[in-house]
Every structure is written in structure tokens, then in C-alpha cells.
């Protein structure tokens, strides 16, 4: 079977199991990179993929440069362990699917193992950077979005898919639907006021909470690209070098892990597995030292 056809069938099966559009898009992006590599090696069919050729692919990833052919980022540095492991994991899932469907007898990717990595350090924005970012906004929509992200720790896609109907300002909550399914998130009175201010400028005739302000898609729901572009512009005005929605989400995770507990943090961020939430615990030695001093049993 042709690689492209096998990939299309795999993505369709993911959709059939209820995977989110964002998750499917990530699978497609990662596996398309693999398909291009295989095509360059003269392999067009899934039956022609061998463990040896996948070893060559793994080596190529270790030698690759980050952001090659990226539309606006400068190339530099090596691919991170997270990036490589994500591609290896998706390749294993794809070829196991091919075995289940009978396209191939055995998977050529089962021998691929994740590379070891040291304790993961999440790249969070600081509180000071966040406040500067909010102050640098130039309209009610952008201010409301950043404050909503800061209060809820939502993913970019969850914010883009928000609707007016599912946002309850009097009770300061909203129903978001993300990669782990729908959940209710809560926000402060200040954020509710910012959203209400935005709604006084909100275009009529659309149910999306956050819409575009101009252009051919005027009054339609913002996309993740629009959200990233807005944050990048605000960050440039504020002199902040970390601006993506996930860096705000990481800050929320760190603060909640520090001041509540991992289970509440898991619910806050919408994680399915608490092991994912655990990356926010003890991110640096200073926090571990402070907790040691605060909870010491040796003090008389």
C-alpha cells in the first residue's frame, strides 16, 4: 500500500476514535515528515519500510537543525528530546496500525525507543512578563484573551473554540472543549469584566467568543495562528521574549502545583494523566530549598 494512503487511513481511524482535530493535525505533521524522508530514500509503499531505514531516520533527526525552513524563526540548535520522542512515538503507532489492518506482517518501528532525557524543565513565562504583556495590549479583545489564559491555563485551541453561549460571566466560568474532552474552567471577576468590555465591541452575527477584528475572515472565530500572532505583537511591544499561549499555561501549572496540589492542578489544566501534571513539581532547586526550610522537622 502507498505510504500516503496508509497515512490517510491512519488519520481517519484517529478521527473515528474521537481524537481532537489538534491531535490529528500533530500526527499528520510529524508523520508527513517521515513520509518525505522515506520518499527521498526511494520508498513509496509501506511494505518497503525496514527497521534499518527507520534507524537512518532516527540518526537524521539527531543531526537535524531546529526550525529548518520555518516561516519566521531562524534555524539553530538541535531538535529537542521531546520533538524526537514525539516523532518516534507517532511512527510506532502508525506502523502498528498498519499491522492491525494487514498492510504489513510486522512493524518495522517496534525497536525504536525514546531517547533518555534529564528532568524536563517547562518554559514558563514569569509573572512580571505576563503583567507587561497584559499592559501592552491595544484593544479589549486582546486584553480579555490574555487575562482568560492567565486565569484558566487553557490551551490555545480551547480559547479559539470558546462560544458566547458556553461562557457564563455572572458565575465566572466557561465550558471549553480540548484534546482531553470538555471541562469547566473558572476565572476571576477582573477577567469577567475584561470579557464583558470586549463584548461591547463584539461583532454581531457570530457565536464565537473571540473573533477576528478585520480582514477577509472578519467576525469569525480566531484561529491559533491569529492568537500566536497577536501574542507575538504584544510581546514585541512589551519587550517580552516568551509569548506563546503554552508559556502562560506553564506559569499557571507552576503556581497551582506550588500553592495547591497536583490533583487540583491536573483538573485545572485538563490533564488525563497526573504524571503529565507532575512536570510542574520542583522545577528548580530554589523552590525545593524553600519548601525544605518551610517544612523542616529538625527545627526546635
Image (cartoon, helix red, strand yellow):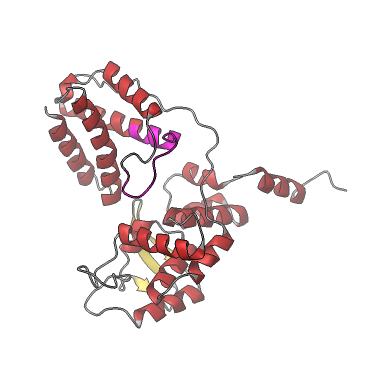
Q: Position of residue 195 (x, y in %)?
A: 41, 75
What secondary structure is the magenta-colored segment mainly? loop
Report which quarter residue 165 is drawn in.
bottom left
Q: Position of residue 150 (x, y in %)?
A: 49, 63
State the count of labels: 0
Residue ID at (50%, 47%): 277
Q: Is residue 82 above or below residue 176?
A: above
Q: Is residue 49 above or below residue 79?
A: above
**16 or 78, which is in the foreground?**
78
Tell me if residue 84 is in the magenta stretch: yes
Residue ID at (27%, 78%): 203
Q: Which span is picked out in magenta? A: 70-87
Q: Position of residue 1 (x, y in %)?
A: 11, 27
Q: Is residue 259 above or below residue 169?
A: above
**52 or 66, which is in the foreground?**
66
Q: Is residue 297 above or below residue 102?
A: below
Report which quarter residue 39 is drawn in.
top left
**218 or 177, which is in the foreground?**
218
Q: Is residue 110 visible?
A: no
In the displayed structure, does residue 59 sit left or right of residue 214?
Answer: right
Q: Residue furthest bottom?
A: 200
Residue ID at (34%, 55%): 178
Q: Residue furthest front?
A: 74
Residue ID at (26%, 46%): 25
Amino acid at each position: 500500500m502507498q505510504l500516503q494512503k496508509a497515512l490517510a487511513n491512519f488519520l481517519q481511524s484517529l478521527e473515528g476514535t474521537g481524537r481532537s482535530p489538534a491531535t490529528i493535525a500533530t500526527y499528520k505533521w510529524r508523520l508527513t515528515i517521515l513520509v518525505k524522508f522515506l520518499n527521498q530514500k526511494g520508498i513509496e509503499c509501506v511494505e518497503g519500510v525496514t527497521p534499518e531505514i527507520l534507524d537512518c531516520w532516527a540518526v537524521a533527526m539527531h543531526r537535524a537543525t531546529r526550525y529548518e525552513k520555518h516561516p519566521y524563526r531562524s534555524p539553530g540548535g538541535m531538535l529537542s528530546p521531546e520533538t524526537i520522542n514525539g516523532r518516534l512515538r507517532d511512527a510506532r503507532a502508525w506502523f502498528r496500525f498498519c499491522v492491525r489492518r494487514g498492510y504489513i506482517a510486522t512493524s518495522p518501528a517496534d525497536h525504536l525507543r525514546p531517547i533518555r532525557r534529564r528532568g524536563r524543565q517547562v518554559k514558563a513565562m514569569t509573572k512580571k512578563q505576563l503583567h507587561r504583556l497584559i499592559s501592552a495590549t491595544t484593544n479589549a479583545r486582546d486584553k480579555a484573551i490574555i487575562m482568560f489564559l492567565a486565569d484558566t491555563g487553557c490551551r490555545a485551541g480551547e480559547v479559539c473554540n470558546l462560544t458566547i453561549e458556553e461562557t457564563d460571566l455572572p458565575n465566572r466560568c466557561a465550558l471549553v472543549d480540548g484534546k482531553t474532552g470538555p471541562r469547566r474552567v473558572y476565572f476571576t471577576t477582573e477577567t469577567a469584566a475584561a470579557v464583558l468590555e470586549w463584548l461591547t465591541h463584539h461583532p454581531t452575527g457570530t457565536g464565537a467568543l473571540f473573533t477576528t477584528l478585520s480582514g477577509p475572515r472578519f467576525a469569525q472565530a480566531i484561529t491559533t495562528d491569529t492568537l500566536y500572532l497577536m501574542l507575538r505583537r504584544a510581546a514585541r511591544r512589551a519587550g517580552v521574549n516568551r509569548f506563546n499561549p503554552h508559556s502562560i499555561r506553564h506559569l499557571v501549572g507552576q503556581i497551582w502545583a506550588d500553592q495547591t496540589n497536583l490533583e487540583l492542578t491536573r483538573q485545572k489544566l485538563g490533564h488525563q494523566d497526573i504524571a503529565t501534571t507532575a512536570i510542574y513539581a520542583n522545577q528548580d532547586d530554589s523552590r525545593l530549598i524553600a519548601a525544605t526550610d518551610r517544612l523542616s522537622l529538625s527545627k526546635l
